[in-house]
Structure formats: structure tokens, C-alpha cells
Image (cartoon, rainbow, N blue to C red):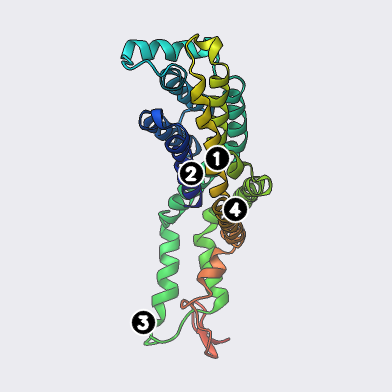
Amino acid sequence: EAFESLLRFAENRTSSLFETAYRPMAKEAAEPVKELFTDISLYVLGAETTVESAVLRFFDSLFPLVYSRLINPGITDLSEDYTECLRLTRQDVNPFGHYSKNMVTELSKSLWASRMLSQALNLGIEVINTTEHAALTKECSKALVKMQYCPHCQGLTLIRPCVGYCLNVMRGCLASVSELDAQWREYISTLEYLTNEMAASHDVEIALTGIWNSINEAILHAQLNGPQLSATVSASKLRILWRVKLAGDLNCKFTVLLLNVFFLRYREFINYMKRSRTFYASIAERLCDGDLVMRDSSTCWNGEDVVER
């Protein structure tokens, strides 16, 4: 949820960049911006895609707009063939300089831990779902029936199993599940490592909230090098770039607030997961610590008879 909020904020901020500073192409840029952040989200969720392909595809779509709306504003009819030609030319002309590659590098580095954490969480869910529906053996079923209902045959409907007896039965029933303890502890340690990696460096937040600035710098580079891209560049269009700094300042305080919430969620998450580190090792104790056993009586059922606790 926190990551989705951060992603939406970064997308809205990027959209605002076009609406504020590059109005001639804002409407047409909306779809490429949406696709970029959708691809980023899919990457983090584990889709078979890369950050590089998402970013470069975005700049491929952006170049025809920059060229026809900012560098050559006289172009009114941007046909599909002409647009595709410009898209293919982008890789050779490199109108955005090193900014597109820098954006790939920064996002790839920062989103890797997020992707790994997402995949690890999905794996954990699969493991838990599998063990949740594990079938009981015949021996286990018999032992549970004996523990819970055999006293009833003697008219002892209120007596409950002794703690030690309950533990023996539950440990026998859950022997296969408890074997997951070592792997589960390692899994929790991995989650802790990935979460700390994300929270310690702030890379994810900085990279995502800085996408708008990387795009702005890339467009600025293309405009400033307009003469090399086109002999008819319009110098008057450069004035629009100075509006961007004002838009960035207005979002500064909200960005800090959002990042603080993001880090708080990180800490809450890892603290919660740490408490489950011994889950599979102590599952029998957890089950026998509830209503299954007699806690407030001097007698209990040991599987054969009523005994003193």
C-alpha cells in the first residue's frame, strides 16, 4: 500500500510536469507516462520485464512529441508513420543525452530490492497457504479424537487435556510442519535484509520521486541541442523550462511527509515479521496455550485418566 501510494505520487508529479511546463504536449504525453509507471509497478510485482525496456520505451514515445511540439512546433500533422520513424530515430540520434541512461541505472538499482521483496512475500504466502491446508494423518486424527473426546465417554465432559499431553499430540501431528522451522527462520532473515536495504538507502523513494526531474532534464537537453536535431528549432520555447523549478518547490514538503510514512511502514512490517520468526518451531506451544488445555484447574486428562496437574 505504501509503495503504491509512492508510485501514484511520482506519477502525478510527472504528469504535473507536462501540464505545467510542457502544455503543448501534455495531453499526448499522458499515455506514455501512465505506461511507464504501469511497467514499473509490474516489474516490482515480478513480471517478465525490465526497468531498461520500460524507460527506453517511454523515451521512444516521448521523442516524437518533443520534436514536433517543442523543437518544431510548426508540425501540425503527426502521422503514425512519421511518429514511428521518429521513435526509431531516437536510439540513433540520442536526443536526451545521458539522462535516459542515468534514469535506467538509478531505477534499476533502487527497484531491485523492491522486486526481490515482493517475490519473497509471494513465496511466503504460498508456503503458508500450503501448510494451512495440510492433511492430517490417520494417526494424528486418532490422537486428536482421543485427546479431546475420550474423557466424554467416562462422563468427564468438562475435563480438558494436560499441557504436556497436548504438546506431545500436537508435536506428533505437526512434525512435518515443524521441519520448516530452519527454512522459515532463513526466510524471515532474508525479508529483514531486503527491507533494511530498502529503508537504509532511501533509494526507492529518491529514484521514484525524482523521475519527473530526470524527464525534465532530458527534455531540456533535447531543446538546448535543438539545432543539431532540427534547423528550425524555436528558441522562444526555451522560456517554458523555467517554470519547472517552481512546480518542484511546491511538492517538497509533501514528498518529505510521504517518505516518512513509507519508512514507518517499513519498520512496522519488519517488526511484525520478526515476531513470527519462531512460528513453525512453536506452533504446538501456541495451540496448546489456548482453550485446548486446562489452565485454571488442579486436574486434567493425560490420555488415560484424570490426574493432578
Q: Which residue is mark 3?
A: 153
Q: Is residue 28 left or right of residue 88?
A: left
Marker disc for residue 7: 2
Give the x, y percent position of residue 275.
60, 63
Mark earlier in primary sequence (3, 4): 3
Q: CA distance from mark 4 to mark 1?
A: 13 Å
Q: CA distance from mark 3 to mark 1?
A: 66 Å
* Circle 4 or circle 1, nearest the eye: 4
User: Is disc 2 in contact with disc 1, using a CB cutoff of under 8 Å?
Assistant: yes
Residue 251 visible in the picture: no
Foreground pick, 123 / 19: 19
Classify 10 Å Cα crowding around label 2: few (below 14), some (14-19), many (20 and above). Answer: many
Q: Position of residue 50 (x, y in %)?
A: 51, 27
Tell me the CA gap for discs 2 and 3.
62 Å
Point out the frontmost of discs 2 and 3.
2
Front residue of this view, candidates 73 and 141: 73
Residue 79 image offset from top left, x and y in percent: 31, 14
Name, please, the residue furthest toward the front.
Answer: 236
Q: Could you give the CA–CA distance between mark 2 and mark 1, rounded to whole angstroms?
A: 7 Å
> Sequence order check: which comes first, mark 4 or mark 1?
1
Q: Is residue 267 left or right of residue 59?
A: right
Q: Position of residue 285 (x, y in %)?
A: 56, 69
Circle number at residue 256: 4
Per the image, label 4 sits on a secondary structure element best described as helix
Amino acid, disc 1:
Leu
Determine which residue is flagged by label 1.
208
